[in-house]
Image (cartoon, grey):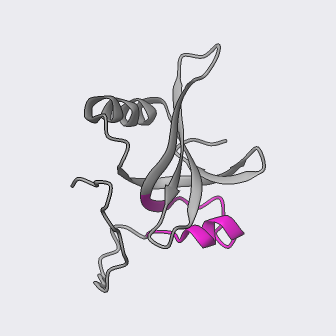
Amino acid sequence: MFIIEDTKISKSSLLCDDKFFSFAGFEEIGNGTLKTHFLIDVIGQVTSLRTVQVSGKDKKKVEFRLMDSSGESIACCLWRKYAEQLDDHLQQTKDPNMVCLIRFAKIGCYKGEVQVTNECI
């Protein structure tokens, strides 16, 4: 799938009984409705991506925001191999427009902001 400048993403009327993914709403994540000890699935368009090499440690992280179809966004942070995969993809495609699906994400708080991540914070 390619997302170009004028691509529009909207809600689908398709309903599926399959429980493979159970996407959490960004509002529920942000307002504290969801319990932080449960793992969640999230999906959205990547915005404001930046790669950070953690000083003094041999690990990389990417920080970005995920935006849903209603325009709400949430902070995200991926570490280690997931950060490297996302960064490698961006370097190969040279296209910052991408959709990211995070399976079994953790909800946490960093610098006073709720975020989802693949590691405990």
Residue depicted at 53% across the width and 58% down the height: 39
Task: Give the magenta-colored segment's residue range.
Answer: 23-44
Q: Residue furthest front?
A: 6
Image quadrant occupied by the N terminus: bottom left
Vertical placement of residue 67 versus 54, above or below = below
Q: Is residue 33 magenta?
A: yes
Residue at the image position 63 percent from the left and 52 percent from the top: 115
Rendering coords of residue 89 (x, y %): 31, 35
Q: Quadrant of residue 77?
A: top right
Q: Looking at this view, is 101 or 105 the one in front?
A: 101
Farthest residue, direction top: 56
Residue at x 44% of width, y 70% of height: 69
Work out which residue is located at the far left of the displayed protein and give it: 1
Image quadrant assignment for residue 18 = bottom left
Instruction: Answer above or below: position of 102 versus 27.
Output: above
Image quadrant containing the C terminus:
top right
Give the tally of numbered discs: 0
Instruction: Look at the image and say whether residue 52 sits in the magenta stretch.
Output: no
Please report the residue visible at 32 percent of the width from the left and 40 percent of the height from the top. 95
Lateral position of residue 61 relative to residue 3, left or right = right
Left/right of residue 4 with respect to residue 111 in the rendered view? left
Q: Position of residue 92 (x, y in %)?
A: 27, 30
Vertical arrangement, residue 109 with respect to residue 70, above or below? above
Asked if 114 appears above or below 26 in the picture, the reply is above
Q: Quadrant of residue 31?
A: bottom right
Quick one: which residue is furthest to the right in this view? Answer: 112
Query: x%, y% of residue 5?
Result: 32, 55
Residue 103 horizontal/vertical position (percent) = 42, 55
- State the residue in front, 23 or 27: 27
